[in-house]
Amino acid sequence: MPSIFTKIINREIPSYKIAEDEDFYAFLDINPNAKGHTLCIPKKEVDKIMDLDEPTYLGLMAFSRKVGKAIEAAIDCKRVAMTVIGLEVPHVHVHLIPLNEMKEATFQHKVSLAPEEFSEIAEKIKSKIE
Ligand code: AMP
């Protein structure tokens, strides 16, 4: 069965899209640690990051860097954290989290946002993609 993220790539489930190319897709995390928390995924469905082939791994890092720089430009934060966990969704994803405080990196601190806020944040980040 396709992962929830494959369904997002295939537009079977909606997402607040940030960026897309032939191999990768970026969208806002629906239960964010902080405003602007974004996920970057390979379109190829692989569960664990260490199982990615090297070109896909390196491509995912380059794509995440591009998206991370846009987040830094769009969101008021000290820096953008990058983390990979994957205990919930078995489809590789890089978390990009704008940080002002350590608690935002813990996944125990969550912010709740209205749909309009998600849309506004996505547009802001999108406008900074180079
Ligand atoms: P983990 O697998 O532990 O790295 O976490 C999976 C992440 O995916 C969590 O931060 C969820 O909030 C996020 N997530 C799950 N479903 C969706 C969805 N439909 N749209 C956006 N983010 C999601």
Image (cartoon, rainbow, N blue to C red):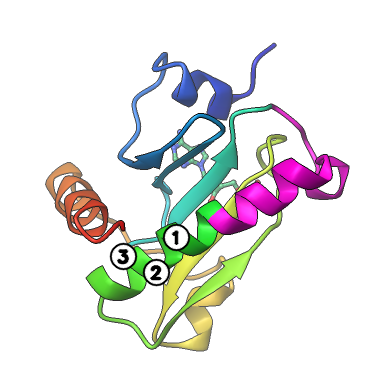
Give the magenta part as a residue range: 45-62
Whether residue 82 is visible, yes or no, is yes
Neighbor class of circle 2 (other Cα within 10 Å; few <14, some 14-19, many 20+) is: some
Look at the picture and state if 26 lies above or below 44: below
Three-letter amino acid code at the position of disc 2: Lys
Which residue sits at x=64%, y=48%? 59
- 1 or 3: tag closer to the N-terminus: 3
Q: Quadrant of residue 51?
A: top right
Do residues under tags 1 and 2 come within 8 Å of each other at their CB atoms? Answer: yes
Q: CA distance from mark 1 to mark 2?
A: 5 Å
The numbered dot on residue 69 is 2
The one of 7 and 63 positioned closer to us in this rendering? 63
Between the C-alphas of marks 1 and 3, the distance is: 18 Å
Percent of width and height locating residue 3: 63, 23
Q: At numbered mark 3, what does the secondary structure look like: helix, strand or loop?
A: loop
Give, as a three-letter code, the residue at label 1.
Lys
Does the closest atom of ligand 1 sit within 8 Å of the Cβ of label 3? no
Find disc 3 in the rendering and name its residue: 35
Q: Name which quarter of the figure residue 23 lies in.
A: top right
Q: Earlier in the sequence, mark 3 or mark 2?
A: 3
Residue 33 shows in the view: no
Question: Dot 1: what SS?
Answer: helix
- For residue 66, the mark is 1
Q: Is residue 36 left or right of residue 3?
A: left
Does residue 46 appear to the left or right of 120 in the view shown?
right
State the CA–CA distance, disc 3 to disc 2: 15 Å
Q: Is residue 115 left or right of residue 101?
A: left
What residue lies at 52% left-to-right and 86% top-to-bottom?
A: 102
